[in-house]
């Protein structure tokens, strides 16, 4: 069963153009010039119930505009969309009971009050029965380990604690489809990991469809089974995450701090690994995972060099998307 | 009324009540703001007591346009309590549009205007009660105890309509944020109209005849003058007439605000990602 279906979904905005300086401001006051800016261009998308989809794209690609159309906040300029069988902008209120959304750093929690008060409000707004609300909130508080700060005003919580509350709050009314717009932004590794686990758990136990945007490759790899990339408002790629990992997310960067200055022993690397930077005691190595594994690179160092610190990083997702875009253009030019 | 409509209305009522409760709880966190506003009210009333004492030549028996000095001072307590109680709705909506936080409101199964109305009414009622206490202390000590009898319940009854009219007036300006970037100028004009021809500074009865006739055709007096006048000069028939005026304006402004919202939400550009 389809959770979401769009055909030719487009949105254009009218943006005022102004020349620089005071003269430009005055001219704009009397003879304003408008320009039409396409934000989303004819997106066709089908998402099955229970799927976890990463919806990616660089800043300004049209991700948030698409999500806002799918949640009924924005009206499209043309095209159609059906979310859980409803038209989002025509049946926004009806749809609202069945979906949930976390918009990046926009908080739904009341700043001066403890999270438990917002939970209570959400229970009322979604018309949950009192016994159902009590059971559900108890379950989520336990699973998300919110007990210690449930009664602390939101302004006194750390970002990680607050985000856990935000995500628990969005699950309260058992949404069938969840839109997550940058749910792990600004969080440290440990909190990110915990939040991903909790979302994955809800997806599995309740078959919640997840539609996620993120700039973090970790979110995509660990949470999603399918990836959809948009660029300049149009669809660029739609494929399983596994294939994307194989074809595109196949590079890692290893940053090493050695106990001694970089020696030949540290530079002797297996095929598929190359030195990007070697300076003093620090070494940066790019690894092509299709040709070698991280463990193999580490194995060449063990016992031969003294290591002080190691970090393994994904290339920034922006870079990956540019890479896909470049590949796509090359393919089109070749054809 | 069919069954499902009744259920729908009851559910909306419960949502509104939940928003109202949280708004008051949140207000209790703003202690400093409360203290500042209340002290400012003390100052304003003190200045006006001095002004009116001079205007009446200190004669407590003197009557100007049907008002004794005591009635004028208590009238001011009522209008100031209502005016200073109104939350900054325009700034809130403008900020929601500018920051994109409006997205969080619009994905909820609750009317956007209904949400703001519940929050506005509960905050204003709470603040108004505190202001009345503070204002009464000043008026009582300078011009004596109030002896308005049914004026108090009259004021309470018309205050609900007054705050609703104030909400709708502010909402009609606030919703302009869906089209224009700045609403502060419009809000400034609205506030000054309420201060003057709305009867906040002095009762409409003290204005020139032609201005009184103009005021009678405008909604501003329904938000301040009518409840304050009903408090100090209570009369059952007048109360009903005032209530009818408020209901009329609520219908007109309600239709305007609903129309603006329906048009605006289609044009809305939600900022922030």
Image (cartoon, helix red, strand yellow):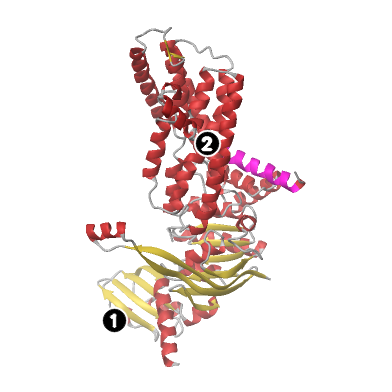
Would you identify the image quadrant in which residue B135 lies? top left
Provide residue B117's location: percent of width, then percent of height. Answer: 55, 41
Label 2: state its secondary structure.
helix
Q: Is residue A171 above or below residue B256?
A: below
Label 1: state its secondary structure.
helix
**Left or right of B122 on screen, residue B97:** left
Disc 2 crowd, CA 10 A, few/some/many (<14, 14-19, 20+): many
Picture disc at residue B165: 2
Disc 1 crowd, CA 10 A, few/some/many (<14, 14-19, 20+): few
Prevailing secondary structure class for the magenta stretch in the rendered image: helix
**Left or right of B235 on screen, residue A254:** left
Provide residue A165's location: percent of width, then percent of height. Answer: 54, 50
Q: Please report the bounds of the magenta region as a residue range.
A: B4-22
Query: From where the camera sits, is residue B121 visible?
Result: yes
Find the residue positioned furthest to the bottom. A335
Provide residue B103's location: percent of width, then percent of height. Answer: 50, 55
Residue B202 is covered by the magenta coloring: no
Would you identify the image quadrant in which residue B149 lies? top right
Query: From where the camera sits, is residue A112 visible?
Result: no
Q: Are marks 1 and 2 in contact (CB under 8 Å)?
A: no
Find the residue positioned furthest to the right. B3
Provide residue B224's location: percent of width, then percent of height. Answer: 48, 29
Which chain letter matches label 2? B
Q: Residue at x 38, y 34 (%)?
A: B192
Q: Which residue is mark 1?
A: A264
Q: Residue at x 38, y 63 (%)?
A: A15
Instruction: Give the distance between the C-alpha atoms of the residues marked 1 and 2, in whole angstroms.
Output: 81 Å
Name the image quarter holding the N terminus of chain B.
Answer: top right
Name the image quarter holding the C terminus of chain B.
Answer: bottom left
């Amino acid at each position: 069963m389809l959770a979401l279906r769009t055909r030719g979904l487009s949105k254009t905005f009218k943006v005022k153009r102004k020349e620089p300086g005071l003269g430009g401001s005055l001219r704009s006051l009397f003879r304003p010039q408008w320009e039409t800016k396409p934000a989303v261009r004819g997106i066709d998308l089908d998402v099955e119930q229970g799927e976890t989809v990463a919806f990616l794209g660089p800043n300004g690609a049209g991700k948030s505009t698409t999500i806002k159309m799918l949640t009924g906040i924005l009206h499209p300029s043309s095209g159609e969309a059906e979310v859980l069988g409803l038209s989002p902008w025509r049946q926004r209120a009806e749809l609202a009971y069945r979906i949930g959304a976390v918009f990046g750093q926009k908080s739904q929690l009341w700043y001066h009050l403890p999270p438990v008060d917002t939970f209570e409000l959400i229970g009322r707004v979604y018309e949950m029965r009192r016994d159902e609300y009590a059971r559900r909130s108890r379950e989520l508080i336990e699973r998300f380990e919110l007990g210690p700060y449930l009664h602390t005003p939101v302004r006194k919580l750390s970002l990680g604690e607050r985000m856990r509350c935000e995500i628990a709050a969005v699950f309260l009314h058992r949404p069938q489809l969840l839109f997550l717009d940058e749910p792990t932004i600004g969080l440290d590794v440990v909190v990110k990991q915990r939040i991903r686990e909790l979302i994955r758990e809800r997806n599995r136990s309740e078959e919640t469809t997840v539609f996620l945007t993120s700039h973090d490759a970790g979110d995509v790899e660990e949470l999603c089974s399918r990836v959809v990339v948009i660029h300049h408002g149009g669809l660029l790629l739609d494929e399983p995450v596994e294939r994307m990992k194989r074809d595109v997310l196949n590079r890692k960067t290893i940053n090493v701090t050695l106990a001694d200055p970089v020696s030949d022993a540290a530079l002797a690397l297996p095929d598929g690994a190359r030195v990007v930077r070697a300076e003093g005691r620090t070494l940066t190595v790019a690894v092509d995972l299709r040709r070698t594994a991280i463990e193999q690179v580490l194995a060449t160092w063990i016992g031969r060099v003294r290591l002080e610190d190691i970090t393994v990083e994904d290339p920034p997702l922006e870079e990956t998307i540019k890479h896909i875009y470049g590949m796509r253009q090359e393919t089109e030019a070749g054809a | 009324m069919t069954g499902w409509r009744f259920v729908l209305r009851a559910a909306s009522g419960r949502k509104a009540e939940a928003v109202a409760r949280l708004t008051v709880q949140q207000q209790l966190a703003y202690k400093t703001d409360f203290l500042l506003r209340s002290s400012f009210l003390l100052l304003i009333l003190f200045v006006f007591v001095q002004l009116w004492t001079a205007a009446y030549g200190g004669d407590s028996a003197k009557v100007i346009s049907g008002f004794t000095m005591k009635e004028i001072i208590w009238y001011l307590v009522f209008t100031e309590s209502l005016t200073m109680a109104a939350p900054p709705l325009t700034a809130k909506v403008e900020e929601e549009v500018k920051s994109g936080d409006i997205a969080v409101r619009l994905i909820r199964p609750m009317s956007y205007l209904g949400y703001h109305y519940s929050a506005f009414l509960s905050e204003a009622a709470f603040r108004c009660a505190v202001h009345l206490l503070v204002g009464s202390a000043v008026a009582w000590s300078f011009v004596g105890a109030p002896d308005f009898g049914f004026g108090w319940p009259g004021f309470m009854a018309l205050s609900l309509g007054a705050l609703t009219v104030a909400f709708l007036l502010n909402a009609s300006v606030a919703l302009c944020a869906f089209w224009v970037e700045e609403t502060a100028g419009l809000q400034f004009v609205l506030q000054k109209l309420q201060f003057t021809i709305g009867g906040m500074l002095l009762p409409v009865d003290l204005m020139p005849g032609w201005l009184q006739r103009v005021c009678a055709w405008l909604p501003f007096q329904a938000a301040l003058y009518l409840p304050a006048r009903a408090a100090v000069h209570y009369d059952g028939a007048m109360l009903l007439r005032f209530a009818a005026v408020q209901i009329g304006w609520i219908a007109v402004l309600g239709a305007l605000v609903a129309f603006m919202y329906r048009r605006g939400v289609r044009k809305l550009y939600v900022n922030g990602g």
